């Protein structure tokens, strides 16, 4: 088999004063033709910087290749000049980035951006370039290639933007395709489509694919071989079967053990006491029209949404982006105002209440947000962030501080966190702070909106366990918003499936997983990455070091 890429003893240095001297240390692995190599690891493992080193896209001089070789066709890319790397990028080695919205130029149409690739590398007429661009967009199964050619990035969905990025990456039939977490921000069904597309394109072109990911479900679906990275080191490598079925390194074992199983948790007895009732909730968004003309766009984010929540129960709301699940969550806590329906908390309808009338009820229903960094005040110390709620509710400063310190201990942080700022913590620690803030007012209902979607798998497992323990300790009721059915299986007693603003199915988690009634629920379940590998509970092999 033809060897496309050979990485030997690679060291990528970090700036002086960093936590460790090397982002990547003594890395050795290779990529062959017509092969998919998955490089797996958590944030900070060095996997993305390895990919950027291959592309010559390191933020030099602060981060640079300090030692080692990146051999491509007998040429060491680690010592190649910038003009030579510009020739290689796109034509020989291409890259698909994690977030297409930031990788694509927002003021250029998709067609112009694909055309730019041909104009830089090939001698083709404008007609030939346009025909080739249309062919590429058709190959990646965009529904209307002609329209996509004229569209700006913001006019396409996340999945469509990622398809456009794949089309650009494959424009010049490169020998190596580097995919850096290309499906992390996508819904499960769109993710399955993009993974299938990458596999098909790789097989059709005989391309070698270096696939960067932290998701072992993705690894199970597409990888031929796997390299596991931890703190800059390649700690284990082998075929997919070897690494997933017989992992030898404790870190690999712990990562695999942290993957949530699709086997639902054992059912619990449901309380007869109903804490929250949502009846016939309606929420519509309108855009366009107005003074500037054009057709008004109407989106029904919530249509006749009805469910209830018992004391101590966790209700999952699952669905893809645009299904309306986050809108429903924000309506429940009154961050959004619904146009119709009832939101009954302990029998009181929250929907028509004004700001003053709502104030006594706010402590009873609190929210944990998806992005803990964006939802925490970066200028406030953690203690103040947690204590602010009780103080506004009438507690004195001494009592509020005592409560904040108790909650820091509850969520697994020490008292030293009280005087630190959010940026001084990891993503998982910031989410713990977000949970502590939500618990500060002793709520009856906790609404968690995708609280683990931005976290690594081991940190995700820790936060899910934390929420489970807190729910049991405080007899909390929880509305848990997620697009990940594996997560829903582990934390939810019942699940409501939403699609285009409507609840299409609701029922106990076990029943819904074993015998889904609605076609959309069956689609979601079948699209879960690594479904066959991780269908059964995995024995917890080891704890992941933080």
Image: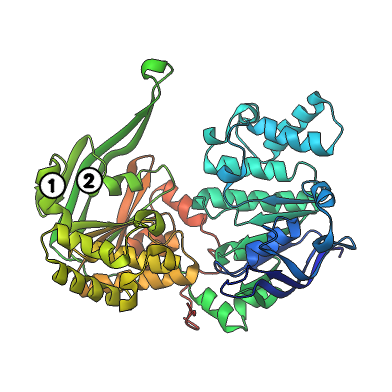
Front one among 377 and 182: 377
Label 1, secondary structure: give it.
helix
Figure check: 4 above or below 125: below
Front in this rendered view, residue 113 or 140: 113
* Image position of 473 with respect to 311: above or below: below
Q: How crowded is mark 2: few (under 14 residues within 10 Å), some or many (20 or more)?
A: many
Q: Do the residues labelled 1 and 2 touch (CB within 8 Å)?
A: yes
Residue in the picture at 75% in, 70% down = 66
Q: Is residue 532 left or right of residue 60?
A: left
Q: Which comes sooner in the sequence, label 1 or label 2?
A: 2
Q: Residue 383: image x %, image y %? A: 28, 67
Q: Position of residue 151 (x, y in %)?
A: 59, 29
Q: What residue is drawn where x is 10% and y is 60%? A: 394
Task: Look at 38% across and 63% down and name the residue there.
Answer: 422
Residue at the image point whose x is 52% and y is 69% from the top? 534
The single residue placed furthest to the front in the displayed view is 16
Q: Which image quadrant is residue 26 in? A: bottom right
Residue highlighted by disc 1: 358
Q: In which quarter of the image is the N terminus?
A: bottom right
Side of 312 relative to 458 (left or right): left
Which residue is disc 2 drawn over? 334
Is residue 533 placed above or below 251 in the rendered structure? above
Q: Nearer the viewer, residue 383 or 534?
A: 383
Q: Where is residue 244 in the image (x, y as percent from the top left)?
A: 61, 74
Q: Quadrant for residue 27, please give it.
A: bottom right
Residue 272 appears in the picture as rendered: yes
Cα separation, mark 1 vs mark 2, equals: 9 Å
């Amino acid at each position: 088999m033809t060897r496309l890429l050979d990485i030997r003893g690679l060291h990528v240095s970090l700036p002086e004063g960093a936590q460790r001297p090397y982002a990547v240390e003594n890395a050795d692995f290779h990529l062959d033709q017509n092969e998919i190599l998955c490089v797996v690891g958590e944030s900070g493992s060095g996997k993305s910087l390895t990919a950027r080193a291959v592309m010559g896209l390191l933020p030099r001089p602060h981060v640079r290749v300090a030692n080692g070789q990146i051999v491509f066709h007998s040429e060491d890319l680690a010592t190649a000049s910038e003009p030579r790397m510009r020739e290689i990028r796109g034509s020989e080695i291409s890259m698909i980035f994690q977030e297409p919205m930031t990788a694509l130029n927002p003021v250029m149409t998709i067609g112009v951006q694909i055309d730019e690739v041909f104009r830089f590398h090939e001698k083709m007429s404008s007609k030939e370039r346009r025909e080739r661009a249309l062919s590429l967009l058709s190959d990646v199964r965009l529904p209307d290639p002609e329209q996509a050619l004229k569209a700006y990035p913001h006019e396409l969905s996340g999945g469509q933007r990622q398809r456009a990025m794949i089309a650009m990456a494959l424009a010049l039939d490169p020998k190596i395709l580097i995919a850096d977490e290309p499906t992390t921000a996508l819904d499960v069904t769109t993710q399955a489509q993009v993974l299938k597309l990458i596999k098909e394109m790789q097989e059709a072109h005989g391309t070698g694919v270096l696939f960067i990911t932290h998701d072992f479900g993705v690894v199970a679906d597409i990888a031929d071989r796997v390299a596991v990275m931890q703190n800059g080191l390649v700690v284990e490598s082998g075929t997919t079967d070897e690494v997933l079925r017989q992992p030898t390194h404790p870190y690999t074992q712990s990562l695999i053990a942290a993957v949530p199983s699709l086997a639902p948790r054992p059912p619990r007895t449901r309380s007869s006491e109903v804490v929250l009732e949502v009846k016939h909730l309606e929420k519509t968004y309108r855009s366009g029209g107005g003074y500037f003309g054009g057709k008004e766009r109407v989106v029904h984010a919530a249509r006749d949404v009805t469910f209830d929540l018992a004391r101590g129960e966790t209700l999952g709301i699952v669905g893809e982006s645009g299904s309306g699940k986050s809108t429903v969550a924000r309506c429940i806590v009154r961050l959004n105002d619904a146009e119709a329906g009832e939101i009954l908390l302990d029998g009181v309808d929250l929907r028509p209440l004004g700001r003053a009338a709502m104030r006594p009820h706010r402590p009873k229903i609190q929210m944990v947000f998806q992005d803990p960094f964006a939802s925490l005040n970066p200028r406030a110390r953690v203690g103040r962030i947690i204590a602010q709620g009780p103080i506004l509710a009438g507690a004195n400063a001494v009592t509020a501080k005592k409560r904040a310190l108790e909650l820091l201990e509850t969520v697994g942080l020490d008292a030293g966190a009280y005087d630190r700022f959010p940026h001084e913590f990891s993503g998982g620690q910031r989410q713990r702070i977000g949970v502590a803030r939500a618990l500060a007012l002793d709520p009856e209902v906790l609404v968690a909106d995708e609280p683990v979607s931005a976290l690594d798998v081991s940190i995700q497992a820790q936060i899910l366990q934390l929420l489970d323990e807190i729910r049991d300790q405080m007899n909390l009721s929880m509305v848990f918003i997620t697009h990940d059915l594996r997560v829903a299986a582990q934390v939810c007693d019942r699940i409501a499936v939403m699609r285009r603003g409507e609840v299409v199915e609701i029922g106990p988690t076990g029943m819904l997983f074993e015998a889904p009634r609605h076609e959309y629920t069956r689609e979601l379940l079948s699209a879960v990455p690594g479904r066959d590998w991780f269908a059964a509970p995995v024995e917890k092999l080891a704890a992941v070091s933080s």
